[in-house]
Structures are given as C-alpha cells and as structure tokens.
Image (spheres, rainbow, N blue to C red):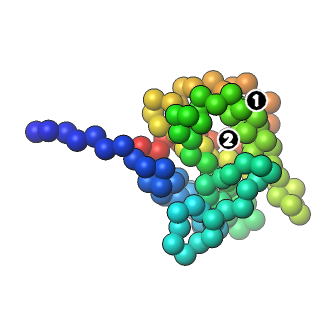
Amino acid sequence: MIELTMRKTHQDRVDDLISHFWKNGFLTVSRKYGTYLPTPKPIGRYEIDALGKFKKVYVMGIVLSESDVSDPKLKQKLDYLSSRNTKYSNKKIKLYVGVTKKLVQKVYDIVAQLPKDNKESIKIIITE
C-alpha cells in the first residue's frame, strides 16, 4: 500500500486551529479564509489568523510556518501577542499557536525565553 503524504496549506492549518477552538468551547468571531466571518484585524502590527470567544473570555490564534519560526522577530511577536488584555475588563487573552510536529520544539524553546506571565497565556497546538 502506498502512503501519500500531502502537505497542508496555511488555510488547512487555520481550519485545524478553528477546530481546536470549537473543541475547547470557543465560538469563532473572525478568521482568515472564512466564507461568512470577517478577517481578523491586526493586533498592533501583527496579523492573527483567528479570534474566538466564550462568554467574556477571548482567544487569539496564529499558525506558524517554517519561515515564521526561523524569523528572528518571532520572539517579539509572541511576546507582544501573549501580553494582550481585553479592552474593558482587562482580562488576559490566551494565544493559541499552531505549528507542525517538526517545529514544535523550536517554538517551545522560543516561548521558554518569554516572561512567566506571557508563557502562561500561550498554548502550543499541533496543526498537521
């Protein structure tokens, strides 16, 4: 039997991220590549792939490619996005980071360099 390995596109990986939101009870507020939902607005100068909500708890999601992980500015991006709070209630916004299996360790190493509060608001998920 021949096993075919197909690379997932960025859109497929965003779909995996949205599925992860749903499994954790979050409704999707905005997302990239959506048919009916708007594209999320940039947070600061950084693009995000999805935004979810459950009652008054918000989550952001980004999907990282191999070129994103090798970018030296990734640490700044994760630091900035993981330090965000809601506008009025000032609650922490959780950041879901989608990566492939082969990049997980590199992302864990980068996250380990962040301040403790920011590390705690990041959740790394595998999108493959």
Q: Does residue 100 sit above or below 36 in this rendering?
A: above
Which x, y percent locates residue 19? Answer: 49, 58
Q: Are marks 1 and 2 in contact (CB under 8 Å)?
A: yes
Q: Give the side of residue 39 with respect to residue 23, left or right.
A: right
Task: Give the number of marks.
Answer: 2
Q: Does residue 76 sit above or below 113 in this rendering?
A: below
Of 79 and 11, nearer the camera is 11
The three-letter code of the residue at mark 1 reads Leu
- Residue where numbered disc 2 is placed: 122
Q: Residue at x 68, y 51 (%)?
A: 47
Q: Residue at x 64, y 31 (%)?
A: 71
Residue density around tag 2, few if under 14, some if 14–19, many if 20 or more, within 10 Å:
many
Q: Quadrant of the C terminus?
A: top left
User: Which label's residue is closer to the chain start, 1 or 2?
Assistant: 1
- Residue where numbered disc 1 is placed: 114
Q: Report the residue that reaches farthest toward the bottom.
A: 36
Q: Residue at x 80, y 51 (%)?
A: 44
